[in-house]
Every structure is written in structure tokens, then in C-alpha cells.
Amino acid sequence: MLHDTKQTNEVKAKRTVKNSVFLDLFQDKKNLLKLYKTLHPEDTDVTEDTLDIITIDNVLTDNLYNDLGIMAGSSRLLLLLEAQASWTVNILIRMLLYLAQSCHEYFERTSQSLYKSRKVKMPKPELYIIFTGNKGRKPDILLLSKEFFDGADIDIEVRAKVIYESDTEDIINQYIIFCKVFDEQRKLYGMTEQTVKETIRICKDRNILKEYLMSREVEVVTIMMSLFDNEQIMKTYLKDAANTAAYEADRATAERMIKDGEMPLEKIARYVPSLSMGELKELKAEVMQLA
């Protein structure tokens, strides 16, 4: 039993460390209700108690993504995925996988079997993408059939509504503006604590997420500084991966040229910049040994 408790605490700690401002903001049921009311102002019966956050386990990667699932009673399942400044239609694939997983977990949670003749009951799914970059000519609706199959009639469809910055004061729009202020400050001050603190100061002055930022300023600074750490780790990883790929490609090229025997090593070195002369000599020795 002690082992199970320890495991649970470790999972909770991991999720807290990997949290984001987006997820932290809507952990508060008051803010979650504001979000839901922004999407469904006609629903006058909804309360904080009828809304539940459902955990979306990242089925593609361990990296942090801002993905939020909301159950509104038993009638609606809302999935909200944030697409930051870099636009990608691949988010539709994430939507499809998350939707399938969320429905599977819902059937398990409500003890419904898909293998019996009785038709199961399921919540109506609603899919939203919150884009924090500039809209430009991007669409308001993303369709799987259009983006991946040139509008062909396919046997499964994913339709997601994209939410951009608007002139409203609702909590979703405030979050988008918060992200844009953050991007502006990062261009000025880089990946520094000053960027985070200036973002918070400007947003409080402009009444953007003011109540949330005033109540959780220390936590927001911690979250955003750990975001910088995660970004730096990812950049280093991608750079190392690119260097490794270039090295392997150069090594394969050099090996072919050595086998051809038409060029001296000094000339081959011009075509394979990631290999030193010493490495070329070792490679030649290996090739000659295998010949």
C-alpha cells in the first residue's frame, strides 16, 4: 500500500512540474466555468459542480502540450488543444487520438460495454483549437478530410473550430493576449525571468487575467521559467540530432568515395565537413580491412 501511495505522489509531482499556465489557469473551477460559458453562453444550467476536468494522457510524446478535456455533465465532452505561434494541421491527428482515448475512458468509467447489443450512451464531442499566433489567412474550421485528403470523401472526419484573438474580453481571449504579450517580451529580453515578470506586469496593468496573475504570480513565474528550461533542452536535443544525422550522412558519403578509390583523403575531406582527417584515415583503414 505504501508503494502505491508513493507512486501516486510521484505522478502528481510530475504533472505539477510539467504544468503550464494554460492548464494551471483552468484548474480553478471558477475559471473553468468562465471558459465553458464563453463557448456555451446559452447553457444557463451549468455550474462549477457540473464541470469536470478529464486528464488527457499524451499519447504521442512525453513533451508538454497544453491539452484540456472537459466533461459538462454527461452530455458534452470538450477537447481544447492549444496551438502556439507555430501553426500545424497535425493537431487534427492529436485531436483524433485524444478523442478516441477519452471516449474509451468514458465507457470504462461509466461501466458501458461496447461488446453488448445495447447501444452505449456517449457525450457529444466538441473540438476546439486555441491558436495564440496571428490568424492571417488561416481557417476558422479545420477538417481532416480537407487538410490531409484534399477534401475527399473519407470514412472518418475530424472537425475542429479554431479560436483566434478577438475584440472580446472573455477568458479565452485574455489568455491569447497573455501569450502574445509574452512573445513580445521574449523578443526584447530573451529567455529570462525579466521576460516573465514584464509579461505579468503588463497583463495586470491591462486587466488581462489580472485576478489569476495576482493570486498565483509566484507559481506563474515558476511555471514559465521551467518552460524555458524545457525549450532549451528540446533545442539542444534537436541540434544534437541534426549534428548526428549530418555526421552519419557524411560518413556514408566518405565510405563510398573511399571504396571508389578515385580521390585522395584530402579531397574527400572537402565533401564531408563533419569528419576530421583523423576520422577519414580510420574509416579508410576499416574499408581496406573489409575489402
Image (cartoon, helix red, strand yellow):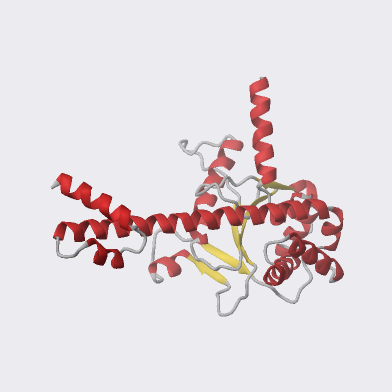
Front position in the image: 84 or 117: 84
Residue 168 at least partly seen:
yes
The residue lying at 65 percent from left, 40 percent from top is: 14
Front position in the image: 248 or 113: 248
Q: Position of residue 176 (x, y in %)?
A: 70, 67
Residue 42 at least partly seen:
no
Residue 7 quadrant: top right
Residue 120, placed above or below residue 32: above
How many marks overall? 0
Residue 81, placed above or below residue 207: above
Q: Is residue 145 left or right of residue 19?
A: left
Residue 201 quadrant: bottom right
Return the residue found at the far left.
291
Front position in the image: 111 or 255: 255
Q: Position of residue 76 (x, y in %)?
A: 64, 53
Return the residue found at the far bottom.
137
Residue 193, placed above or below residue 219: below
The residue lying at 61 percent from left, 76 percent from top is: 135
Assign the N terminus to one quadrant of the image.
top right
Q: Is residue 32 left or right of residue 133?
A: right
Residue 31, placed above or below residue 188: above
Q: Position of residue 275 (x, y in %)?
A: 34, 58
Q: Position of residue 224 (x, y in %)?
A: 71, 56
The residue lying at 58 percent from left, 73 percent from top is: 140
Residue 83 quadrant: bottom right
The residue lying at 52 percent from left, 60 percent from top is: 91
